[in-house]
Image: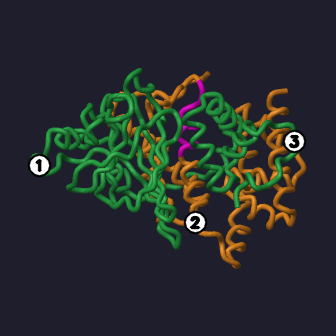
Amino acid sequence: MTASDLPPPDDGMTDREGLAAEYVLGSLPLADRATAERLIATDAAFAASVNAWQNRLSPLNDAYAELAPPPGLLARVEARLFPAPAARRAPGRFWLGALTGLALAGFAALVLLPPLQRPAAVVATLTGAAQPLVVAARYEPDRQVLTVTRDAGPVAATGQDYELWVIPEGKEPVSLGVLRDTALSVTLAALPAGSTLAVTLETAGGSPTGKPQGPLLVAAVISG
Amino acid sequence: MTEDPVASLIGQIAAGDRDAFRALYSAASAKLFGVAFRILRDRAEAEDALQEVMTRVWLNARRFDPSRARGMTWVIAIARNHAIDRLRARPAPQDGDDALVLVADRAPGAEAQVVARGEVRRIADCFGRLEPARADAVRGAYLNGLSYEELSARHAVPLNTMRSWLRRGLQSLKECLEA
């Protein structure tokens, strides 16, 4: 069930204002939260409304008691964010070499939502060093759908497009389509650990050869 | 706006300062772990959540705007949002899980204990104007991440009634705070 299945409450709030308020309150089902998170990334007015609600309700945060996390947790975070230079792999094509350099810049992250009965969603943030573009990816194994949105950074210049690629470990990149203003949803049978998601800048409509030709902008490696 | 050391640290993190990242961890991790644990009610999962939250703080620091939020408000929002997303991604609760929900709340008047800051007093006043059951539902949703289903079961009202309570409660709070 999603909240959108319920009749809209007659409370004087617009749908958007109500969604922003309920998102911050936390009571929404996952599907509606995902809708809100997409809007935050794409709609500045909605993001401002969410921000205002966060500020309004922030005095409630005083009710959260502090609890010391276990020692060593910071080290685990740092190991993930700032990996020591990995052993050099056999040099691949130029483009894959660029990808390795980018990964070493330490800007790949993902989260596995809890591995309970339902297959866990995989969430990754594609970023690059000194790169304003930030792309969010979410893969739902049970639906076999990968949804990708531009979270930050400019639109591609006229005559150019961002193109999304999946690179199975040790294989050639496969195009998943071009990423414009709306979320890009594609069917993908699997997104195993070790795969890479990457975005390159290509000519409008995407690389005509079916292989990446333009510069690699952002990427994330899926880790298990 | 008063001094905001956490916001300054986030600004340094946005420039890639790892020492600032460690300093932010020292300053905020106990609060963020408290948030994750209260919502997830599972220590191991709260640890995973805190790792992810700190990762997002590093990755998203350049999107923080100190003119729009205090630093702690921003990092706590990341922690709440991530913990609630994890909670919602869990399978639907089985019968018997209700007891957990019922005992998990009640930190009575915790927000009222902190009266030093004017804004805290103001929101406490505004909460005081809501019907007690509705104020309790708003707190349960915000602090513990309770869903409509859990709240409606707990307060023995239909789901859409609960949704109206919450939305009207929020609308009243907004009007009261802006008055």
Dot 2 lies on which element?
loop
Depth check, front residue: B95 or B44 = B95
Q: Main secondary structure of the magenta part?
A: helix
Q: Can residue B14 be spotted in the picture?
A: no
- Which colour represents chain B? orange
Q: CA distance from mark 3 to mark 2?
A: 30 Å
Q: Give the percent coordinates (x, y) of residue B113.
A: 73, 46
Q: Amino acid at mark 2?
A: Arg
Q: Amino acid at mark 1?
A: Arg
**Dividing the picture into quarters, in which one does residue B170 lie?**
top right
Residue drawn at x 61%, y 33% is A47
Q: Amino acid at mark 3?
A: Asp
Which quadrant of the rendered structure holds the N terminus of chain A?
Answer: bottom right
Please tell me whether residue B178 is drawn above or below residue A163 in the rendered image. Answer: above
Residue reaching furthest front?
A208
Q: Residues within 10 Å of mark 2 (few under 14, many from 20)?
A: some
**Dividing the picture into quarters, in which one does residue A165 lie?**
top left
Lateral position of residue A42 relative to residue B107, left or right: left
- Which colour represents chain A? green
Please tell me whether residue B156 is drawn above or below residue A68 in the rendered image. Answer: below
Same chain? Circles 3 and 1:
yes
Residue drawn at x 22%, y 54% is A171
Provide the residue designation for mark 1: A88
Q: Give the percent coordinates (x, y) of residue B177.
A: 80, 32
Provide the residue designation for mark 2: B90
Provide the residue designation for mark 3: A11
Residue drawn at x 47%, y 68% is A115
Residue drawn at x 11%, y 49% is A88
Give the extent of the magenta segment. Answer: B68-78
Q: Chain of mark 1?
A: A
Callout 3–callout 1 Cβ contact below 8 Å: no
